[in-house]
Structure formats: C-alpha cells, structure tokens
Amino acid sequence: MALLMEHQFKQLPADKQVETRSFLESVSYLPPFFDCLGPTVFAPVKADIAGNITKIKAVYDSNPSRFKTLQQILEAEKDMYGATWPKVGATLALMWLKRGLRFIQVMLQSLVDGEKDDNNPNLIRVNCTKAYEMALKKYHGWLVQKFFQAAVYAAPYKADFMKVLSKGREVKEEDCINKIRQFLVNFTATNDAIYEMYTKMNAELDYTV
C-alpha cells in the first residue's frame, strides 16, 4: 500500500473547495497505479491520466494565486472561452481525470467491500469490471470498450496486485485492505467534490471517444 499511503489526499475544508496545489501533488503519484493492473495493457490509461494532470498543472502554474482552487480554474475558463467551454482547457482535462480517479475509487472500494467472483476468488476482474462500468464505459465507443474488456481480462491476481501496490513487499491481505480503506476516505471525498462541482456548474459532457 506504500504506493497510495505515502501520498494521501488532504482532508477537504467545510466548503468542499479542492486546493489545486495539494490536489496536483497527490494525484501526480497515481498514474503508476495502473502499472499494478498491467503495465502494458493499461499503459494508454496511465498516459491519458498523466497527460490530463500535466494540462491542469500548466494552467495552475500560469497563475498560482488566481487558481488556488479547482473551482477558480473552471470559473476563469468559463469566462475566458465562452461558448466553447467546457470542452476546452483544464476544464476538459479535469473532467476526464476525475473519471480516471473514479475508476480507481470504485475498484478499490469494491476490494474493500469484499466483492469477488466466487469461482475465481483470487482474481480482481470483478472489481475492475465494476469500476469500468461505473466510471468510464458510457463515455467510450465500441472499439474502446473492447480494448478495456481485454485489459480487464488481463488484470493480475489479487495477491500479485496487493504485492505490487506495496512496492514488492509481502503484506497480509487484511493489512493491505485496511490501508486501502484509510486511503479512500479523503480520496473519495475529494473526487466526489469535483463531480459535485461539475454538476453545479453544468460542466459535465457526455460525448464518447
């Protein structure tokens, strides 16, 4: 669990405003998560998430005092881009990034909840499939869906996944699950707040790729 626990997300303030700098710092360590699922088959997902983080960071770095929160970025881009918003800039990058984060969130929560295939209890295919269907499937066309089905089918055994997540250290499954549960508290709250922000600002788009 070292991969996740070393870079915990900050607890949100009462107004649920997500501080841009701390968010970017924490989320920048998440792309390697997909190496745990399969460094080859999940490479496009990893690259997509890393690319979206880079785009958001570029906007933040252009004026850190103006873009202290993610909402300030969206508000500024809404004024800046007019009719082409939200399908532009950091707004679009964050829209796709939060979906990738939701995939991680649902998959880890499914593991914590003990969901499994009774016929193959040491596979995480069930957890990956649930995460894909809840977070990404509706935004993907037929070809991309087929790619993900193949990627999910190639997902590792649970024991191997836990070991890679713990950077090669042998850990008890119960200990690893407890640490995942701990990581999910602030991570889930943060991503849920971003989803809520997109809904309130009518920034969500449903087109497929």
Image (tube, grey):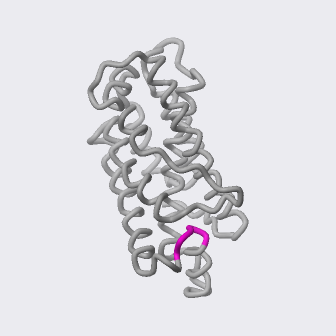
* Front-lying residue, 89 or 44: 89
Residue 169, position in %: x, y? Answer: 29, 24
70 in magenta: yes
Location of residue 25 (image quadrant): bottom left
Q: Residue at x 56, y 47 (%)?
A: 135
* Front-lying residue, 165 or 131: 165
Residue 148, position in %: x, y? Answer: 42, 43
Q: Residue at x 46, y 28 (%)?
A: 125
- Would residue 154 be seen by someone viewing this image from the given angle? no
Q: Is residue 150 left or right of residue 131?
A: left
Judge whether 154 appears above or below 46 on screen: above
Residue 192, position in %: x, y? Answer: 64, 51
Q: Residue at x 53, y 53 (%)?
A: 99
75 in magenta: no
Judge whether 127 appears above or below 27 on screen: above
Residue 28, position in %: x, y? Answer: 38, 55
Judge whether 59 appears above or below 123 on screen: below
* Front-lying residue, 156 or 98: 98
- Would residue 199 be seen by someone viewing this image from the given angle? yes
Location of residue 133 (image quadrant): top right
Question: Is the N terminus in the top left, top right, bottom left or bottom right quadrant?
Answer: top left
Looking at the rendered structure, the number of numbered marks drawn on it comes to 0
Q: Which residues are magenta?
A: 67-71
The secondary structure that most of the magenta stretch takes on is loop
Q: Is residue 57 left or right of residue 131?
A: left
Q: Residue at x 51, y 37 (%)?
A: 183
* Front-lying residue, 175 or 152: 175
